[in-house]
Image (cartoon, rainbow, N blue to C red):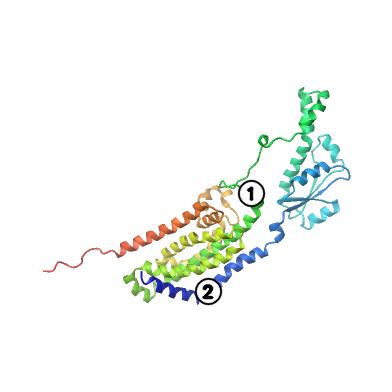
Amino acid sequence: MSIFLPLFKSSLRTQLASRRTWLLMLLLPLMTFGTKALLPAREVSTPVQVGVVLPEEGGADFWACLSARSGLVVTFHQADGDRAERQVAAGQWDCALVLPEDFEDRLARREVEELFILLTGPGSTVYPMVRETVSACVAELISPGMAEDYLLDSGIGSEEELDSLRPRLQEVLLEQDRVLVSMETVDGRPLDPLTLADSGVSGLLSGLTAILLLIWVLLAAMDLGRWLDSPFARRLAPLRGTLPLLLPRLGAELIPALCAGALALLAVEDAPACILSLVPYLLFWGAAALVLARRSPLWGALPAQVPFVPPLGLLLSPVLLDLSLLFPALGPVIRWMPITLYLRSCGGSLADALVLAAGGLAILALVWALEAKRRAPTGDMQGPCP
């Protein structure tokens, strides 16, 4: 293996002198930082804006309930009718609620049918969640009255006893007595709704980086295959073996890819985890590139296959959309795609990073074993001396 270092230095100098290498190294960071800059900052960092038009009299308790639920995901704004219509029409607010003038009277009579007018625009998307929040506030306001009606109708209490029972009907349940809702991802990990938007942007940028690095490695496989067919490599391969010749050149190809990927991933939220995950990811695809480079029909077919890598990478991994939610049969395929494993390792899954690393090492071991078997002597070709 004494030839490794000279070949590596020579290949790395060749890579650094190549315009294609510098173009790709600039393209990756420009793609991630440019995509992040082009995303509307308001949509990324600002919660959904919802307007609320209260009646001239009443609605204070309802507004207090909505305000308590206003936060980093949905923010409610009190406004008059004209402003609410303008904001929704301009797309500044997702939707707006308009309360009727007899809102308090209808709540007292428990008449909740068509209680609100919901203003939506062409770009409104979150209004189903807003309806759920509004329904929860209405249920909170009318629940004491409903409980009183139930006590009277069932005979549990009488009109004379209601005054003493009302304080208990207004009590808030303790934490252990409530029905709590917890959210988790499809794979069972806990989900914090406040991190949903940021994780979506980071997943998009990390996925695009992984796809472009895959194209980089496929181009490297074509370079290795062409070099292996050169007269110099053909003369040296029988003496040194194919794998010792390819490994230093492959390392020289992957180092610029690793540096470009690390620079590109500085744009994501959890940059250190994503950058560290590049090592097993590139190890896996680098081992696959060795397999492709050793067979001329395989690397010769890559120019026709590379254009299909971006769409397949987007469809068969949860970069934009997890198709396994729509087509469960695709679940096992998407789950074990290298890009999916990389994205999961970016999210902190050490097991998926180890799967990528183990896959790459297994491919390397298999290639090494096959070459050792091919180079092993088959027997003594000379007969005994007389």
| Quarter of the N terminus within the rendering | bottom left
Q: Position of residue 371 (x, y in %)?
A: 34, 63
Q: Which residue is mark 1?
A: 192
Across and down, in percent, residue 312 comes to 54, 59
The local secondary structure at tag 1 comes to: loop
Q: Which mark is residue 320?
A: none
Q: N-terminal of the two: label 1 or label 2?
A: 2
Crowdedness near tag 2: few (<14), some (14–19) or many (≥20) residues, C-alpha within 10 Å: few
Residue at disc 2, secondary structure:
helix
Instruction: Give the spatial CA distance, label 1 vs label 2.
Output: 42 Å
Residue 144 makes an appearance in the image: yes
| 349 displayed left or right of 92 | left
Reading the image, the residue beneath label 2 is: 20
The kind of residue on which mark 1 rests is Asp
Residue most extreme to the left:
386
For the C terminus, the image quarter is bottom left
Residue in front for this viewpoint, 106 or 67: 67
Q: Is residue 285 above or below residue 16?
A: above
Local crowd at mark 1 within 10 Å, few (<14), some, or many (≥20)? Answer: few
Could you say which quadrant of the image residue 3 lies in? bottom left
Residue type of the residue flagged with mark 2: Arg
Place of residue 80 in the rendered image (x, y in percent of width and height, measured from the top left):
85, 51
Q: Position of residue 293 (x, y in %)?
A: 42, 67
Pair 1/2: label in front:
1
